[in-house]
Image: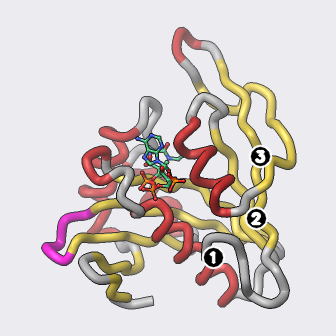
Amino acid sequence: MSGVLLTDRYLSPMTEADLDEVAAIEKLAYEFPWSRGNFQDSLRNGYYGVCLRHVTGTLIGYCVLMPVVDEMHLLNLCVTPQAQGAGAGLALLREAVRLSRLQKLDGILLEVRPSNPRAVHLYERFGFATIGRRKNYYPARHRSREDALVMRLTFSKEGADAAE
Ligand SMILES: CC(C)(COP(=O)(O)OP(=O)(O)OC[C@H]1O[C@@H](n2cnc3c(N)ncnc32)[C@H](O)[C@@H]1OP(=O)(O)O)[C@@H](O)C(=O)NCCC(=O)NCCS
């Protein structure tokens, strides 16, 4: 995965040189963002990071993936607010599937807030199924907590996954 060209955008592995831009988008897009150090730790632990940039070089979005035994865990997927709704999320998910298949993994697991319908819609449209709920998983406003939906995409043996 080095500089895969998609018309006006390209994918590349996330490196420490990307982290200032990644952390800036993270703060814009999430109420409870990861810190720059969270991304740095992920890369230093050997997790996969993927950046999606416009051909001009502007960072559009990114994802972070952690392989666990036989499946990939999608830890973070984010598109900068002004680029949302134009297929960048789908492009990053497709790359997550490609990388996971390359590692001969069986599927992708993720957690998502039920209060994030845009993300839930994206994952459902892509073929993820809700397989459970983790109680009080996320921080929420007023020092309260929010459950997480646990969703899984199971790869088909033939390689013809939904929305690929
Ligand atoms: C969730 C997120 C990654 C989706 O990325 P995106 O680039 O906007 O998504 P895409 O353009 O690829 O669109 C995928 C689907 O989401 C839908 N969608 C996109 N923008 C939307 C909006 N403003 N309102 C409702 N649905 C929307 C699209 O309609 C599309 O589905 P459709 O083709 O059936 O209509 C992005 O909104 C984001 O980064 N949000 C903030 C961070 C976050 O919540 N990350 C997920 C944490 S689990």
Q: Which mark is residue 145?
A: none
Farthest residue, direction top? 142
Pointer 1 or 3: first along the chain? 1
* In the rendered image, the vertical position of residue 129 relative to residue 91, given as above or below: above
Whether residue 92 sits left or right of residue 114 in the image: it is left
- Name the residue: 55% across, 67% down: 93
* In the rendered image, the vertical position of residue 24 relative to residue 88, given as above or below: above
Task: Measure the C-alpha gap from mark 1 to mark 3.
Answer: 17 Å
Task: Report helix, strand or loop for mark 1.
Answer: helix
Q: Return the residue at label 1.
A: 97
Q: Is residue 38 magenta?
A: no
Q: Contact, CB < 8 Å: mark 2 with mark 1?
A: yes
Rate crowding at label 1 as few (under 14), some (14 to 19) or many (20 or more) other CA atoms within 10 Å. Answer: many
Three-letter amino acid code at disc 1? Val
The quadrant of the rendering that contains the C terminus is bottom right
Whether residue 61 sits left or right of residue 98 in the image: it is left
Three-letter amino acid code at disc 3? Val
Q: Which mark is residue 153?
A: 2
Q: What x and y, as percent, mark residue 9?
A: 28, 76
Nearer to me, 101 or 18: 101
Three-letter amino acid code at disc 2? Leu
Q: Which mark is residue 150?
A: 3
Q: Quadrant of residue 126?
A: bottom right
Q: What x and y, as percent, mark residue 154?
A: 81, 69
Rate crowding at label 3 as few (under 14), some (14 to 19) or many (20 or more) other CA atoms within 10 Å. Answer: some
Task: Report helix, strand or loop for mark 2.
Answer: strand
The answer to whether residue 43 is seen in the rendering is: no
Pointer 2 or 1: first along the chain? 1
Task: Report helix, strand or loop for mark 3.
Answer: strand
Image: magenta residue range? 55-59
